[in-house]
Structures are given as structure tokens and as C-alpha cells.
Amino acid sequence: MKGAGPTAGSRSLFSRMRDGDEIARLMTLIFAATVVLITAAVVWKLWINSALPRHKFGLHFFFTETWDPITEDFGALPFIYGTIVTSAVSLFIAIPLGIGAAIFLAELAPPRISDTLQFFIDLLAAVPSVIYGLLGIFIIVPLVRDVIYPVLNGSLGFLPIFKGPSYGVGFITAGIVMAIMVIPYIISVSREVLLSVPRDQREAALALGSTRWESTWQVVVPFARTGIMGSIFLALARALGETMAVTMVVGNTPKIAASLFAPGYSIAAVIANEFTEATGDLYLQALIELGLVLFLLTFIINGLARILIIVTTQKGSGVTQ
Amino acid sequence: MNHRLRWRKFVSNFMLTMTGVCAVVSVLVLFFILGYLLFNGGTSINFKFFTKLPKPVGETGGGMANAIVGSGKVLLLASLIGVPIGFFGGVYLAEFSGKGMASVVRYAADLLNGVPSIVVGIFAYSVAVLPFKHFSAFAGSFALGVMMIPITLRSTEEFLKGVPRMLREGAMALGASKWKTIVTVIVPAAYRGIVTAILLALARVAGETAPLLFTSFGNRFWSQGWSEPTATLPVVIYTYAVAPYEDWHRQAWAAGLVLLGLILVINILARTILSRGIAVPRS
């Protein structure tokens, strides 16, 4: 490694120190180790600071519906339910739109246009979530109440998910806002993955007489399937951890309701709302345990996403992320 | 046969048009957001907005000077925490690391990158608020600094590794030691990319609200030093947006416009720096 002189291997620690190489290595190593330490500290702090509720409620924490700060009885079910439902709604909207747009950018658009649009999509990904929340409150909430609710309730109101009254805020509103937020992630990663599909795959399909769409949908997309799944998992991880936009439009009611129009809650939203006013250690630690749950959820989903994306891009032209 | 072919062609054209529609809709969202913010916030931005403190609850008028300065303070300190750790850690990964340690660091950074921002907030709360028993600008900076680390680290590593081998070998052949090569040749060759990465990291945390809610908290007055609760733009936007006052909503739009403008400008700036070419030593 240190090929500076003929005696490189046998140089004493002292001479290496004088070179400065060893000092530089140690210095940067300290910073690198700090990164590991901080990450470990995040996990450790979440774990020890949630000891009280973990011991008191055990696994029941995940299956009880009560959230009562006064009697200090805490159950996470409504929040877990809300997090899953809002994320599901957002993916339901974002997946077709995102993949459609990615196909256009990767397969159809000339490189120049594709790059320009991708630039705007990168900017869209940079819009902070509090801004989405702001637009959510003043645009999506009235839209859900006055347009989407009458239409869906009127035509499909017999389905339990569209039953009941709407206050504008609720699972579906949060889902719509989050969909807008995660679409850029799906587009960027899917486009990258689609672009890494080898040319011969397309040409072979076209040579066999398939139309442009058939070659795309039956050859290119299946080839990139795992990577596209990866982009969806990535979006899911974002959606699960999304805080501000959800807090602002989900209704903040710890109830489990079948209707998507009902107000609900999510893990991240309850932490954001109640953390500063949590009186008593048990209350605060119950919130921290929710944080731990959120951390583990996103950890697993992010891990899956990364594996899927790496597998596809390597299978393709060897283009790495 | 002919009929079937025509149908297949129709399906093809229809679906491909639909993908185009998807792309256009996705991009239009950005312009809609910008337009709506300009429309709603543009009229509320005036000189007072930048120079005055918030008025007491119930009175109209006033500005957000303290939140603008507060955001600046928090972001400055966050960069001072996050950038050195990320940068030097990245130098270690690219230049000095053996196999074992490097993959641990990389894995830790990726893990940290995926941690939801609200969880980072909890972490900062337990490290920088609980022991001191009060909210502070420092705690907020710590949270944002932690979020900047993984982005800075991985991009520094990537751009340093992108520096051509010849440059490295050239410097070594002239007798420079390894650290001298890094300081005088490799880092200067990659600095555009690294600056871009730092700017992007800064833009990303500039809009973060969740980790600041219970670290830097908020303040309706000026905060002195680093150990007092401090107002920041994103948190003010949130508080004002969910409050029932018409005048606060107006100011939330204005603050949203300022924040988004700032973030988009940093983003565009960063991408222009990058597109002017990296790893090209000119002199």
C-alpha cells in the first residue's frame, strides 16, 4: 500500500508517522468511526429510552387500541394501522404514475428531454415535506371533501372503505399528499433501472415483430422488474417515515376505521404532535418505542430495496447506482 | 390479421401516450407548487416580513426575522457538525480504508441515511436536550448535522474515487507522500463534486421540520446564543399553517415561498457547479 520507497514494508512506525501518512489515516479513521458510533448510538438510545413501556406492555403494545395518557395505558395499533393504510394509499396512486413516467423517460423521450424532465423531478424531490403539508391543508383537504368524497362515496359508497362522512382530513388525504411526495423517488430509480436494461433485449423483441409497447411491457419491464420493486420499497420506506405532511392532513385521531375518509393517525405524526407535551416518563418512552418501531420498519424495507436495486442493475449492463 | 395488427398498434400508441401523460403530470406538479406559492405568498412578502419580529397572537402584521436568522444559525452549526465528519470519513473510505472497516462505515452511513427524520429528532432530543433540560439551537443543529453526515460521506467517497488513477500516480511518482497527494491533488480535482454534494445535503436538511420540533423548538422572540429555544422557518410554517388565524396562514405561505425558493436555488446552483465538469484539473 505504501509504495514510497524500497523499504516500504519494513519502515518503522516512527518514519511512517513523520511522513504524515499514518497520522492522516488515523485522523480520518476517527471521523469514519464517529459515523459508526453515531449510528450505533441512535439504535442504543432508542432501545434504552423505551425500556419502561417495553417491560410494562411487552408485545401487547402492538395489539392494543387504547392510547390514554391519563391512565397511562398505551397501545400502538391505531398508529401502526394508520401508517400502513396511508402508505398503501400513497403507493396505490404513486406506483402507476411513477412507473408510467419512468417508462416514458427511459424508453420514449429523447435523451435531452428525458434529462430535462429528470432535472425537474429531482427538484420536486427536494421540496420539503412541510410545504407539501401546507398545500395539503389548503388544496387537497378541500379537494377531498368537495370533489373526491362525493364522487367516490356516491358511486362506490357501498364499499366499507368509502363509507361514512368525510371531514376532508383523513387516511386518503394523507395518502394523496404522500403519493405526490414519493413519485419522484419511484421515477428516478425506475428510470435508472430501465436505462440499464441491455439494448439487445429491446431490439430482439422489436425484430420479432412486437410493437414498441409490447417490447417495453413484455420484455424491458419484466427484465427490470426487481429493480422497479426496489424503487417501490424505497418509496415505501419514505412514506412510512414521512412526518410533517401526514401530521398536517391525517386528522390526528387515534382510531381504527375501515373508511379511508375517516380521520386517523400515524406513528410519525403522533411522535411529532405529542412528544413535547408528553408528561411522565412512561408516556414519553411509549412515544420513543413508537420511534423504535418506525426505525425497524424503515430499516427492513430500505434493506430490501437496496438488495433489489443492486441485483437488477448488476444483471443489466453493469451500470451501478 | 390486419385487424389484429391495427389493434396492437393502437394499444401501443395509446399506452405510450399514457406514459407521456404520467411524466408530464409528475413534472407539472412542481410548477403548480411553485405557481401556487408565488400566487399566495408573493403578495405577503414585504420588507417587514424580513425585518420584524412576529406580533403577539391575535394581532396582524409582523414578520419572521427571528425565524430566518434562526434557520441560518441552525444550518450553519449543522454544517459545522455534519460536513467535517462526512468529508473526512469519506476521505478515509476512498483513500485509507481496508476492507473490513470500510464496509462497516458504509453500512452505518446507509443505515443512518434511511433513518426517518423524526427518529433522528428523538435521538437528538435524548442526546442534546434531555441532559441539559432545555430546548436549544444546538440540539436542532445536532439533529440536522447528523442527517448531513451520510450524504456528505458517500458523495465525498464517490467523487474521490472518480479521480483518474494517473493523477494519483503522477503525484506519487514525484515523491509526494500519500496525504500530500490527497491534499494537493486528489481533493482539488474532486472539489466540485464534493461542494455539490455538501450543497445538496444542506438543501435537504434546510427544509426539515420534524427533527426540529422537539430540539430547537420555537421562539417568538430573538434567541441569544446557541442554548435557547430558536425559531426556524420550517417549524414556523408548520405552526402557522395549523393555527386558525387567517393572517398566520398568509405568513405561512410567504415563509413557504422563501424556504422553497432558497432550497431550489441551492439545488440548481449545486447542479450547475457539477455540470461544469468534475475531476478536471485545469491549471
Image (cartoon, coloured by chain):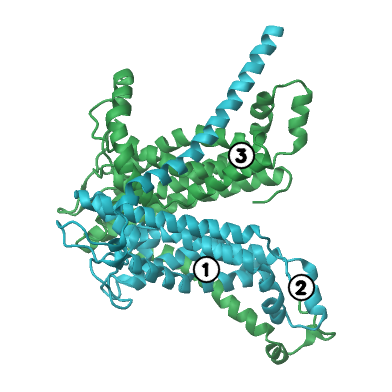
Chain colours: A green, B cyan
Q: Position of residue A211 (x, y in %)?
A: 70, 22
Gap between marks 3 and 1 measured at Cα:
30 Å
Which of the two labelled residues, at mark 3 and mark 1, occupies the earlier sequence position? 1
Residue under numbered circle 1: A36
Q: Is residue A300 left or right of residue B276?
A: left
Q: Are marks 2 and 3 on the same chain?
A: no
Residue depicted at 29% across the width and 37% down the height: A141
Identify the residue at horizontal 23%, vertical 34% (top origin). Answer: A167
Q: Say which residue label 2 marks.
A: B168
Q: Which quarter of the figure has residue B142?
A: bottom left
Callout 2 amino acid: Arg
Q: Which residue is labeled 3 in the image?
A: A226
Residue A145 position, x and y percent, is 27, 31
Between circles 1 and 2, the one closer to the viewer is 2
- Which chain hosts label 1? A
Is A293 in front, or is A180?
A180
Chain designation of label 2 = B
